[in-house]
Image (cartoon, rainbow, N blue to C red):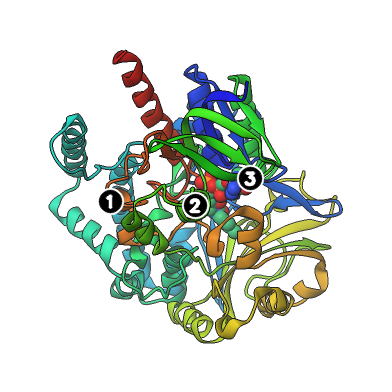
Amino acid sequence: MNETDVVIIGAGHNGLTCAAYLARAGLRVRVVDRRKVVGGAAVTEEFYPGFRNSVAAYTVSLLNPRIIADLKLADHGLKIVERRAQNFLPSPDGSYLLTGEGRTADSVAKLSAHDAEAIEGFSRELEAIADVLRQFVLRAPPNLVEGFSATAIREAFNALGTANILRGLSLEQSRNLLDLFTRSAGEMLDERFENDLVKALFGFDAIVGNYASPYAAGSAYVMLHHAFGEVNGKKGVWGHAIGGMGAITQAMARVAREAGADIRLDAGIREVIVEKDRAVGVVLDSGETIRAKYVAASVNPKLLYTRLMPSGALAPEFLARMNRWRNGSGTFRMNVALSALPSFTALPGEGDHLTAGIILAPSLGYMDRAWQDAREHGWSRAPVVEVLIPSTLDETLAPEGQHVASLFCQHVAPELPDGKSWDDHREEVADLMIATVDAFAPGFGKSVLGRQILSPLDLERQFGLLGGDIFHGALTLNQLFSARPMLGHADYRGPLRGLYHCGSGAHPGGGVTGAPGHNAAQAILADHRALFASR
Ligand SMILES: Cc1cc2nc3c(=O)[nH]c(=O)nc-3n(C[C@H](O)[C@H](O)[C@H](O)COP(=O)(O)OP(=O)(O)OC[C@H]3O[C@@H](n4cnc5c(N)ncnc54)[C@H](O)[C@@H]3O)c2cc1C
């Protein structure tokens, strides 16, 4: 019979995480995805004959260690390695910054004695705040509820628990936290540092997936969001999953299937079935229906509510607000097959710097201009590019002696001005991105054997990422924590009974964390137990 306990829309890493926890708890789970492979934005594909790469998400840090341990992902094939250097920022004037364990202090000192002193304090400040905020990652934020009920009591306790965690911050740290949530990264960095590359190191994290200037209020939070992570117990470090990001989701799918979950691919959802104000299943594109006690959606909330719900199922004010959900990361993603490693003018030849996230954006001013240019022109003519060459750490991705690189490029407008289409400009913008890398590493362009291009429109069409938004919705204060995806629905429960959010549009937001999937599974299990207890 086409009937189950839980149907999960989307087999991205959060859908799979949610499925694994629920199936392990004994529920019958079905996951359905419109793509032919599991993984959503965390996937490895052959993009050019003989060359494989993480096609969208490309680097690991945010994946929650408890989820790795609970799901025994390492036993299911996941191996994460550290980069040998964390970040490399070359400047057109020939100077560079190279960070990582045992490297940062010396490298910064060569650029600025002042910054060498300041960076330690700032890193400690960020780390202390990240440590406290990490405690919020695997718990639902306090949810706003009206009236007096059992739910209101539960949320009052949740708010108390939240306040208790925040008490872990000193008064000065609380002030810093307020700054980080509300101010611009640019202002905060200008106050602390003098060297452009040092500011750019942190400033880049403030604009990753964030279509904004580093001087935009709120950009400091995006910087903090990227500091939550760790690799193999080392906090704040970024690494690489052997086999690419798809290795994470392949391991998750194995765990979910072993626990009994059924994962169906090439099976898009056309509509959620709603009966008497309750979500009771889904209709596939094929017309087939699956009925379920619980429907959990890991897709962008705006996609769920504006495209997959029957008309009249939602309150008009809810729908109007969801229509205003802000999407659009301003990113353009390329994968390139390389005949040889690049050689950077600022640090020629091979070395550990080629295992790092190579940030081509030498100052905050450069990033600010990139955003302004994209606003006016549709894309920045001097774009920000992060180059990552995972084949320097992983020989499974490219033929021997050859390499693959991820180019994560910003800023581009999610939608081009004057009615222009990304389909008419993607090749031209791809050429620009290659030329930008070539300017820092002459000969790079000639080494490109093949390329895959993902404009914001391609990201939307291929992965269901509306406006190409890599986080399923901007990480702005009005779309974060208790307001993600909307005040009143921060507890992973949607506006209809039986409907849940388990994707990046729920707290704690985007990135390959597994946290929304984990937290939604806890909400579903709590409701399931309550249902049984009441019988
Ligand atoms: C270009 C890019 C670079 C990124 N880089 C990084 C990075 O380096 N590190 C990092 O941690 N994060 C990164 N991110 C962010 C991260 O990848 C995402 O936030 C995360 O993968 C989202 O996971 P999810 O499971 O919530 O949703 P998704 O991965 O988006 O999964 C949702 C799934 O729903 C499916 N779906 C959509 N519509 C339907 C439908 N109608 N019926 C059935 N299924 C449907 C989709 O096919 C998809 O598989 C990046 C994202 C992008 C796009």
Q: Is any part of residue 444 visible from this angle?
A: yes
Q: Residues within 10 Å of mark 1 (few under 14, many from 20)?
A: some
Q: Residues within 10 Å of mark 3 (few under 14, many from 20)?
A: many
Instruction: Please give the label number shown on residue 77.
Output: none
- Is 22 left or right of 148, judged from the image as shown? right
Instruction: Please give the label number shown on residue 487.
Output: 1
The residue pinned by badge 3 equals 245
Q: Position of residue 124 (x, y in %)?
A: 31, 53
Which structural element holds mark 3?
loop
Mark nearer the N terminus (2 vs 3) = 3
Residue 450 against residue 472 in the figure, above or below: below
In space, the residues marked 3 and 1 are separated at their CA atoms by 32 Å
Q: Position of residue 175 (x, y in %)?
A: 18, 59
Residue drawn at (17%, 38%), measured in percent from left and top? 164
Instruction: Please give the label number shown on residue 300.
Output: 2
- The label nearer to you, 3 versus 1, is 1
Q: Is mark 2 within 8 Å of ligand 1?
A: yes
